[in-house]
Amino acid sequence: MGDSEGGGQPVPGAPLAGLSGSPTPGSFGTTGRGPRLLAGGGRRATAVSTASTLIVVGALVAIFLLAPGSADVRHTFFDPQDMWQSFIGNPKAGYYSVGAAIWLNIRMFCVAEVLILAFSLVIALVRQSTSPVLFPLRVLGVIYVDFFRGVPLLLVILAIGFGVPALNLPVVSHQPLPVYGVTALVLSYSAYVSEVYRAGLNSVHRSQVAAARSLGLSHPAAMRYVILPQAVRNIIPPLLNDFISLQKDTALVGVLGAIEANNAAQIYGSTVFNYSSFTVAAILFLLLTIPLARFTDHLIERDRRRRLAGGTA
Amino acid sequence: MRRIMIAAAAAAIGTSLAACGSAGSGGSSAATASPVNICSQAGIGKLLYQPGVLTVATDKPAYPPWFIGNNPSNGKGYESAVAYAVAKQLGFDSSHVKWVYEPFNNSYAPGPKKFDFDINEISATPQRAQAVWFSASYYDVQQALVALAGTPIVTQHQPFQLRRYVYGDQVGTTSLAFINTVIQPKKQPKVYNTLNDVKQALKTHQIAALVTDTPTAAFISSSEINGSVVVGQFKSTGEHYGLLFSKGNPLVTCVNQALATLSSNGTLKKLQKKYLHSYLSIPALKS
């Protein structure tokens, strides 16, 4: 954690930097570029924090290694041989590759994300509408959001995945399992994301609408060119937050019998009685979600810098 | 002051850890000290999870014909009857057998078990035996196919035809390995959390057939899914069900003695006839 750029100190000439549009470290009396894990304080602080981190981590590791059942737990959850076997899979021995199965999670996530973004925007716009003609739709929107935010996602997945095929309709009832899983994810997550959109729309000051309308823009045009761009910029971090959550929740589709990473891990676990496969699945999910989490942090930080730079961005 | 308290807390944790360690080693030395009459009344008494009673575990729901009426403690159904027969051999009358609920997926978790043995149609395999201990066989398993009447698989099930269909099974059963080694389908099987989910998938045509042991298959087709039939059963691959024990539990020796007695005096055969017989006249499948 080297603070070679002098994180805590105000940078000389900061106002100039602000005018030129580049970030302004140290403005508003914060430490460096935004809230940090390690607030400044020089070498001594770095040494103390390093030492305390080592002690805490060391103690946790020691407790883990010295616990009476440590060897059992290490063998059951972290056996390298089992982790590798579950990663590559062996259908003839009765289990599938967790590494290949995560591909299904990724595909489900990508499709679901696009559909959620579009569908939830429609819900949010309907709920924000003011036209008396749309009143029944607004009521439906409220009921929809209340319902799908209130019902556990797992139940929605089970109801769609087992209920829709049971209806025995042409085409609709004869889809692959991931289609039902994605449908359930879209239904449930759209309820959450529409609320995020709505918060974004509400965050744009009403004078913006008035200004756009006074320029002669119709209501839809004002929404499209003035309100939405500002609203969406405000909600990118919470949207990404929901999508990190969505990446993990694709694992719930496994209950329908689809062999995604979590189900593949469970199959391995119950076939050879070892949970190391779940560790593999966890690592793979981390590899997926951490980049998105860091990207979210990056966007939040960039947005913050732009605002502090004078709101010209 | 605060530092002293932290140090005291750390010391307390340290001593409690040490206490756990010594308790563990004491237990194992006691077990090895009296190897001779370990299966005597007194010897078994020392090995029990709960003093005075034999604690037997199974999953919920408990399926027929292994259990009847979802009630393991009524002594009806093959596994319930076997558990009571084993208990009797070990010297426990039926009032000293206690049933506990243990989901299959928890039965092999590391750490102390909360039962003496688990009886839940669990196949004994060498890989699994690294995590838990199994008794000798109390039932030799054959796998069977259940399908809806009138679907293609009911009439077209030559080995090369069997490869065309989509199969379903319950997670953790050995049926999945069986499907992939013996049937070798072209499409990936679907794997469900519970047997009820598999049945639902069959009813809604998401799978062409479900694979499970013959008695379960026969029960599903005769009583649970209207319009379903057992297509046939495959020949044995040497698979068998065993009672599940925590790894290193010496009680398995005594239970194996009991099972050997029950096998040689014909009790197991008699119970199979009573509870499983009507299910065993299923046509054989080529594989």
Image (cartoon, helix red, strand yellow):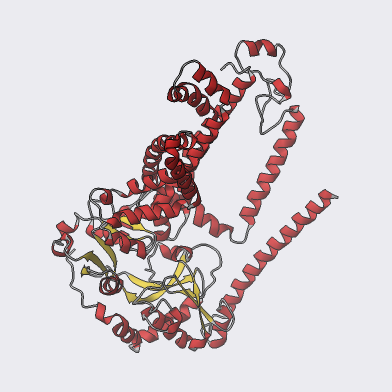
Q: How many numbered marks appear?
A: 0
Q: Is residue A175 left or right of residue B14?
A: left
Q: Report the residue at 58% width, 61% height from top.
A: A69
Tell me where residue B202 sits by quadrant.
bottom left
Position of residue B15 relative to residue B139, above or below, is: above
Residue in front for this viewpoint, B104 or B202: B202
Residue A183 in the image: state x and y as whole percent: 37, 45
Residue B81 in the image: state x and y as whole percent: 40, 83
Q: Is residue B162 left or right of residue B44?
A: left
Position of residue B180 relative to residue A194, above or below, is: below
Position of residue B230 relative to residue A197, above or below, is: below
Q: Is residue B124 left or right of residue B179?
A: right
Residue in front for this viewpoint, A218 or B134: A218
Position of residue A189 relative to residue A230, above or below, is: below
The answer to whether residue B110 is seen in the rendering is: yes
Q: Report the residue at 38% width, 68% height from top.
A: B124
Which residue is situated farthest in the front direction here?
A: A132
Q: Is residue A27 left or right of residue A135?
A: right
Q: Report the residue at 61% width, 54% height from top.
A: A65
Residue B50 in the image: state x and y as whole percent: 58, 78
Quarter of the picture holding the C terminus of chain B: bottom left
Tell me where residue A35 sits by quadrant.
top right
